Image (spheres, rainbow, N blue to C red):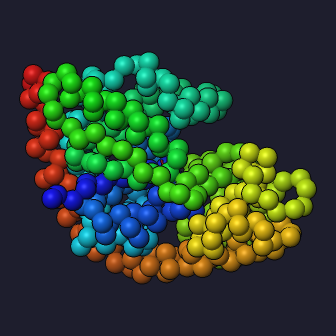
Amino acid sequence: MTRTRIFSGVKPTGHLTLGNYLGALRGWADEDQHRADALFCVVDLHALTVEHDPARVRRLSRQAATLLLAVGLDPRLCTVFVQSHVDEHTRLAYLMECTASDGEMRRMIQYKEKTERERARGGSVRLSLLTYPALMAADILAYGTGEVPVGEDQAQHVELTRDLAVRFNQRYGQTFVVPKATVPKVAARVMDLQEPTSKMGKSHARTSGIVYLLDEPDVVRKKVMRAVTDTGSDVVYDRAERPGVANLLDVLAACGAGEPAELAGEYDSYGALKKDTAEAVVELLRPVRERHAELVKDPEYVDSVLRDGAERARAIARPRVDAAYRAVGL
Ligand code: ADP
């Protein structure tokens, strides 16, 4: 029996966060790479969908790739690469644009949210922000992916990818595997510590509510201790009514301390909960920071991993993308 193929990625639009780690990267390293034939990617083309600075994108791509190794992805077990190194992504993205309708693209929640943000800044909206899910579908479908491990915020895009795969297969003959999203049980949506009704997102302007993977321990402590909590002082797990406290409980639980609702019963003050959460996060991130510090001393190693990764990825993607071109009549 062939092993399940897994594909997932991370955008170099900012420094990677605790949300990225708990919602995605940790599962890739601790579970996915061991149980499946997995590919993990820095999806740098997606960073161009909003206003960007070329030097910053290059620096952040490099940092994200190094962090993928620092969280424990092992190139002997899985394939780690950068999206723009493999042309098959953009080749297939065009066929996906020819499969999708503009209406389904416009319905994507992230498109609506990001469009509002860009317009509020007075900027224009890049067309690629609308077509982003077609490229994401191509990223996934090029590899015959069965599972896409993502945080909750990406589930809608994976749903669209499924629809496009089914539609393409119906129109042109069986070409793509229809993938499904897998979302972690706890911390699938880590919220901003200062604004616990919105997700902790790496490209948000205000950084005090975001824990970055490379934050120093004291910075992590400060951010968690200053997290916005809710009115009242009793610790209960209620994501709708008490989003601030629920978020801390989710994070603490995801650090390995148990179930969020049960943990709530162990605390009678917000202060104690914050203190334990801060320490748990510091310990969780410590090995990642340490491995990252080692890896930046060896840029040739990181380069060689990415070079091999791109080669492996290309070899997997090319036959399927070629087959898709033939299927549509080219
Ligand atoms: P970002 O929103 O930080 O730019 P990406 O789109 O690069 O994130 O996502 C990388 C992975 O991290 C995706 O699987 C995404 O679902 C996950 N992720 C991003 N933010 C969070 C969050 N706050 N909580 C849980 N998972 C998240």
**Can you tell which quarter of the image residue 170 is in?**
top left
Out of 110 and 298, give the one closest to the viewer. Answer: 110
On screen, residue 206 above or below 249: above
| Residue 204 visible from this viewpoint | yes
Query: Quarter of the image holding residue 102?
Result: top left
The residue located at (55%, 54%) in the rendering is 188
Camera-nearest residue between 250 and 215: 250
Is the residue 285 above or below the residue 110 in the image?
below
Q: Where is residue 148 in the image (x, y as percent from the top left)?
A: 37, 50
Identify which residue is drawn at 58% across, 73% down. Answer: 256
Residue 328 placement, left or right of 15 = left
Give residue 209's position: percent from left, percent from top.
Answer: 70, 56
Q: In which quarter of the image is residue 103?
A: top left
Side of 299 where 214 appears, left or right:
right
Residue 45 visible? The answer is no
Q: Residue at x 46, y 66 (%)?
A: 26
Q: Is residue 275 left or right of residue 52?
A: right
Q: In which quarter of the image is the N terminus?
A: bottom left
Residue 264 in percent (x, y) is at 76, 65
Q: Which residue is at a point 67% across and 45% down the rendered structure image?
A: 198
Position of residue 227 in the picture relative to residue 140 (left or right) = right
- The residue closer to the viewer here, 236 or 274, is 236
Quadrant placement of the C terminus: top left
Measured as percent of width and height from the top left, residue 232 is found at 91, 56
